[in-house]
Image (cartoon, rainbow, N blue to C red):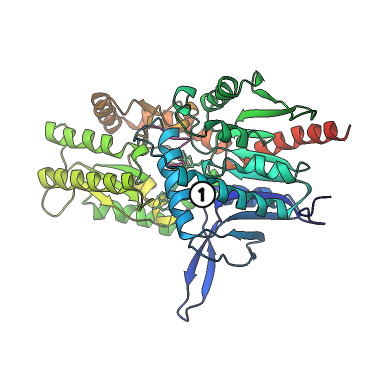
Amino acid sequence: EDAQRPEAGHELVVVANRLPVDSRTLPDGATEWVTSPGGLVTAMESVMRTVDSGAWVGWAGGTGEAPSPFVADGMHLYPVPLAGHEVERYYEGFSNATLWPLYHDVIVDPEFHRTWWDDYQRVNRRFARAAAEVAAPGGIVWVHDYQLQLVPAMIRETRPDARIGFFNHIPFPPVELFSQLPKRNQILRGLLGADVLGFQREGDTLNFVAAVRKLLGYHTDGQTITVPGLGTAPSREVQARTFPISIDSQSVSDLTEDPDIQERARQLRADMGDPAKIVLGVDRLDYTKGIRHRLKAWGELLADGAIDPRDAVMIQVATPSRERVDAYRQLRDEVELTVGRINGDHAPIGRPAISYQHRSFDRRDMTALYMAADVVLVTALRDGMNLVAKEYVASRPDEQGVLVLSEFAGAADELRAALRVNPHDIDELKSSILRALAMGEDEQREAMTSLRRQVMDHDVQAWAHAFLDELESVGRDEITTRRI
Ligand code: GDG
């Protein structure tokens, strides 16, 4: 039998680029690990409680030697090491300067270098080995996102007993765009090592199936793909399915009942000079989020005199992101120039027209921001889902507030009661903002009630369970077929 197969192992292994922890250096120079409570971590904690033994394989950040495996919050963490040049070529290069722009409709030009691809393959192989080593016989391995698309097939090579799932957090592009990707067929074959492939929107799933059909010529029947076996090996079936991701809705909603957070929300409004309306944007500083379009619309509304900066203030949280990738440096310069100009032209003395925050806030401050915001602008040019939209809705048990939502965000498929916009149409964006600012309490309540029904009923725990249920049902058939 395979030397890599452990006698025992973990029933559920999550594989993602990052481990759900951040290192913190203590005063004595020692390192401690703090779990970073993102949505994925919350979802996984909930499903890991249902298995005897769960593990997470991922990069711990930093370069060189990785820390030894350790346990945090009951999860077994297996750090994968990355060398400095691998961070540059696998992560900043192929993942974030080739795949990311290509999968987001080529908003910026994808760059490609063959050395990036070499490192992408090598690092994917390393992640696959680490996962294959720790999964229990017949266990579940759940691989996440565009950085690790070759991992499903690489795990299958040594662990055909495992049930392998893959979830794509970002869009899957139309085949006409996907075809530009050098090594596109290797990527498709890598993904097809999984038993179940999950996507955010129905459109992404259809794009993937069409790419497999057109580029590999495999037979597809609805969302079932037949992968021919090599030589005399039997063919396998792979399911491509839509699983829109969500948030831990109840815990977000519960935070709004905390008196300290309620006080922060009141204080925030007072600090802004008690404007009639606060308009909020929260994004990683990324060119896919449409931050420049939003600023352009806001600047024009001020210039037109349609908005008085004493009545309405915009807060833009732009969390630092991928600061070593060129396109992100450029975006930051452009955004900061625009914010400076708008404030210079329109802000009253002592108060901003746009309060620009280039840093992270803790979860509690984020909730206070959502509670204080009369309008939230989600103007993404392309976005897998967009959790900010769902977090805003979960933060409004008072059923007030208006969500302006781009039709290019995955969330638009579910959040039908939002004010829907095409962010490329600046005139439409401006009139939607004005409409949101003018909306009365009753109309706000009607829309927000409907949005809340959607978000509270479909949380991230349900998302994870739906994916794993699908994987378990097809996985069993797979194993039976193989034993025959
Ligand atoms: C990818 C896909 C998909 C942001 N700033 C702060 C902060 N955040 C949190 C938000 C939200 C998360 O980060 C961002 O999630 P998004 O979904 O909006 O966007 P991406 O980072 O691009 O995520 C996306 C997602 O994966 C999941 O599949 O929805 O489409 O691109 O939760 O609240 N959180 C805190 N401080 C900040 O300053 N605490």
**In which quadrant is the C terminus drawn?**
top right
Q: Which region is colored magenta?
A: 381-389
The verdict on residue 52 being magenta is no
Please give the count of numbered marks on the rendered protein.
1
Is residue 50 left or right of 122 when viewed as pictured? right
Q: Which secondary structure lies at badge 1?
A: helix
The quadrant where ligand 1 appears is top left
Identify the amino acid type marked 1.
Asp
Taking the image as shown, residue 65 lies to the left or right of residue 313, namely: right
Foreground pick, 312 / 388: 388
Is any part of residue 395 visible from this angle? no
Left-right relation of 224 to 210: right
Question: Does residue 268 appear in the picture of this structure?
Answer: yes
Indicate the position of residue 133 as horizontal and vertical percent values: 72, 54
Q: Name the residue located 37 percent from the left edge and 57 percent from the top edge.
A: 263
Of helix, strand and loop, which mostly describes the magenta segment? loop
* Rendered image quadrant of residue 287: top left
**Residues packed near mark 1 inside 10 Å, few (<14), some (14 to 19) or many (20 plus):** many
Residue wearing tag 1 = 119
Q: Is residue 86 above or below residue 476?
A: below
Compare residues 253 and 404 and report the one nearer the observer: 404
Tell me where residue 55 appears, x and y as whole percent.
Answer: 67, 55
- Relative to 252, say whether 410 is above or below: above
Q: Does the magenta stretch include residue 387?
A: yes
Residue 434 higher or lower than 18, as above or below: above
User: Which residue is drawn at the image coordinates 12% and 35% (left, top)?
Assistant: 303
Q: Position of residue 241 (x, y in %)?
A: 62, 29
